[in-house]
Image (tube, rainbow, N blue to C red):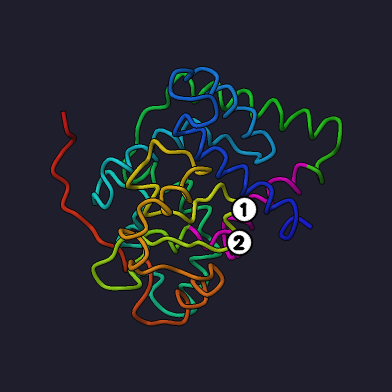
Amino acid sequence: MAYCFGGVINHSLMLAIHEIAHNFAFGHGRPKANRLFGYFANLPIGIPVSVSFKKYHLIHHRYQGDEKLDTDLPTLLEAKLFCTTFGKFCWLCLQPFFYAFRPLIVYPMSPTLMEYINFIIQFTFDGLIWYFLGGKVLVYLLSGSAMAMGLHPVAGHFISEHYMYRKGFETYSYYGPLNWITFNVGYHNEHHDFPAVPGSRLPEVKRIASEFYDNLPQHNSWVSVLYDFVMDPDIGPYARIKRKHKGLAS
């Protein structure tokens, strides 16, 4: 149930938080409302991610591929340890832990007041769940979040977005049905070209600018993406375009 049902919902909530990080819930003119809604969407996930995700994700957009600032890039240690077929399988299973702890190692930043508020709200909610509904319910929520971020069809978007399946192409879109439950995160070329356009409008971006997107390499299945990632020796945690760090832009 946690893998097939609760995990899918929690992963969808994570991608709702992605939308909220771009201020799409209430618009760019209402940052406080977006932040509060992010706290709320975070609750069933079980761990406080809303504010920290926004902090690092916007850096990913601005400095994509930067070897220091883009914490979406696997570390050299990950690339060396998980380069075999079995190693890549294990890496996919452990993906939620790498996403959670990699930023703290690669580019640590002091927690902000908003992050502390996120922690307090989330752990208070977790404590209330434990007290009133029991530990099994909390474990169900947490395990669903962990499994749906690892070896799971919906989590295929983590790999499909920026791993270099075709040499020289660092971002890929997916236009299949799983976009219906992931806020169109599969429209990833479109999202990086127009990060101020909400996911609900990205299909329209592709339609009116089809000459720019139709001929780009794209994925047809996130399950196939995961299978190819594990089985193809030319693809792995190292299959990313990296750029030398040149410092923060003023």
Q: Secondary structure at mark 1?
A: helix
From the image, give the main secondary structure of the stretch colored magenta. helix
Instruction: Give the numbered dot on residue 177.
Output: 2
Query: How far is disc 2 from disc 1 in space, using C-alphas?
Result: 6 Å
User: Residue at coordinates 61% horizontally, 49% vertically from top-left?
Assistant: 11
Q: Position of residue 77 (x, y in %)?
A: 33, 62
Does 128 lie within the magenta span?
no
> Residue 129's quadrant in the figure?
top right
Q: Of the residues shown, which amino acid type is indicated by label 2? A: Pro
Q: Of the residues shown, which amino acid type is indicated by label 1? A: Trp
Which residue was labeled with disc 1? 180
Instruction: Give the numbered dot on residue 120.
Output: none
Observer-nearest of 190 and 84:
190
Q: Which residues are magenta?
A: 138-157
**Going by the picture, which residue comes out furthest to the front?**
208
Q: Secondary structure at mark 2?
A: helix
User: Residue at coordinates 33% horizontally, 66% vertically from top-left?
Assistant: 216
User: Residue at coordinates 45% horizontally, 63% vertically from top-left?
Assistant: 159
Q: Position of residue 199 (x, y in %)?
A: 50, 44
Q: Residues within 10 Å of mark 1 (few under 14, many from 20)?
A: few
> How many numbered marks appear?
2
Q: Position of residue 204 (x, y in %)?
A: 46, 48
Q: Are marks 2 and 1 in contact (CB under 8 Å)?
A: yes
Observer-nearest of 171 and 128:
171
